[in-house]
Amino acid sequence: RRCFVTGKIFLWERDTKLEGILALVRSTPWWSDEEYLLDTAFYVRKEARGRAAFRLLDAAEAHAKMTKLPLMISLFTGEDIFRKELLLARRGYHKIGSTMVAS
């Protein structure tokens, strides 16, 4: 038996310095057999936030359009969540749930 993971990694560099990464995999949610693209890593250095995030999202959205698959971006840190949600909402994303953690 074999396991195949199909994915795509986008890197944003400036002056040979890595400023951001957005990694996608093809997946299916537990409630459906319909494939979509899910981010497994989305990080931008604090000094590059804004510009790099926009470029990485542009690349991921172009890839989603090319593959004709919906794109799901997950926000897994509680840091600056409102700003991140606002950025995605302005780009046409909508919220489908939430992650809660007991401390």
Image: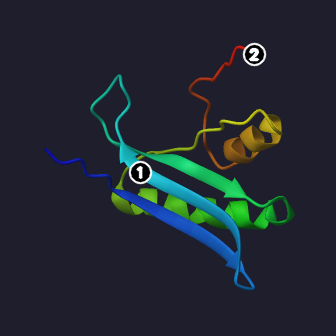
- 33 vs 2, left or right, is right
- Which residue is label 2 attached to? 103
| Marks 1, 2: nearer the viewer | 2
Element class at badge 1: strand
Q: Amino acid at mark 2?
A: Ser
- 72 vs 37, left or right, is right
Rendering quarter of residue 84 = top right
Residue at horizontal 18 percent and vertical 48 percent from the top = 2
Q: Amino acid at mark 1?
A: Val
As displayed, is residue 18 above or below residue 8? below
Residue at horizontal 68 percent and vertical 77 percent from the top = 13
Q: Nearer the viewer, residue 9 or 31?
A: 9
- Which residue is label 1 attached to? 25
Q: Earlier in the sequence, mark 1 or mark 2?
A: 1
Element class at badge 2: loop
* Residue 51 position within the rendered picture, expressed as x and y whole percent measured from the top left: 77, 67
